[in-house]
Amino acid sequence: MSDTSTPAPRLLLASQSPARLATLRSAGVTPEVRVSGLDEDAVLDAATARFGALDPADAVLVLAQAKAEEVAQVLTREARERDEASDAVGPEESAPIVVGCDSMLELAGEVYGKPKDADEATARWRAMRGRSGVLHTGHWLVDLRDPQDGGSGATLGATSSTTIHFADVTDAEIAAYVATGEPLAVAGAFTVDGLGGAFVESIEGDHHGVVGISLPLVRELLGEIDVAWTDLWA
Ligand SMILES: Nc1nc2c(ncn2[C@@H]2O[C@H](COP(=O)(O)OP(=O)(O)OP(=O)(O)O)[C@@H](O)[C@H]2O)c(=O)[nH]1
């Protein structure tokens, strides 16, 4: 029986990804969405300057953390401005738990985000057909809840990594797939749940982590701050 005095936890998705939002909704969680205006290249450059070359699993975690923390800072500033502007002591809405994500494909020692154009998408598919890669998705949580609402003040994250076995597609299939435009909007130039699904022979690891957010990993991270996944269904 959950404690009825504590408001149900709220998740806020710090991502413009329609696939991440749809994945959470299909799992019974309807988060608010705030998009971070992050310069991902600048974040990676700063991290590389500080820590040296990053493994792909670390690079996506650095970016997920940066997105979540940037949105968390905006929310905190907005809450402070609301408090300062209003002397009315009303029922404060409980602050959310922010989740940020980032996905990249690792293939033959290279790391790929979204292709910059159709030519790059074509070249990538010619390189990856018949081969295997790893789709890494970084996840980062920032718990903004007040202590009286069970807030931990914690910030934590982890990466899910799923091996993707690509079909040996033909040049004609590549051309047709690139012409749909789908590969240009997604990390690794493929989807496992969309038009690209026919070109993924099998995967080893979490399916949703490929789509953009690993549900079991988010459940595990929430567990570390004493939040039950099912409390998000409220
Ligand atoms: N539907 C679907 N989307 C995928 C798949 N693989 C990658 N993506 C999407 O590709 C995008 C990866 O780019 P990111 O930089 O991580 O995220 P984004 O879309 O730019 O959004 P932000 O989180 O706001 O940065 C995400 O929107 C993922 O949901 C897939 O197999 N299926």
Image (spheres, grey):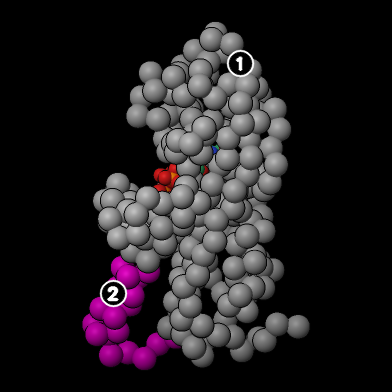
Q: Which residue is mark 2?
A: 77
Q: Which residue is mark 1?
A: 169
Quarter of the figure with the C terminus? bottom right
User: For the magenta stretch, what is the residue range?
Assistant: 71-91
Look at discs 1 and 2 and give the one toward the viewer. Answer: 1
197 sits left or right of 31 in the view: right
Can residue 205 be spotted in the picture? yes
- When the figure is inspected, residue 27 is found, relative to residue 193, above or below; the finding is below
Determine the residue positioned at 36% across, 91% down.
89
Marks 1 and 2 sit apart, C-alpha to C-alpha, by 50 Å
- When the figure is inspected, residue 9 is found, relative to residue 50, above or below; the finding is below
> Does residue 199 show up magenta in the picture?
no
Q: Nearer the viewer, residue 147 or 122?
A: 122
Mark 1 burial class by Cα count in 10 Å: few <14, some 14-19, many 20+ = some
Three-letter amino acid code at the position of disc 2: Arg
Q: Is mark 2 within 8 Å of ligand 1?
A: no
Pick out the residue farthest to the right.
1
- When the figure is inspected, residue 12 is found, relative to residue 92, above or below; the finding is above
Quarter of the figure with the N terminus? bottom right
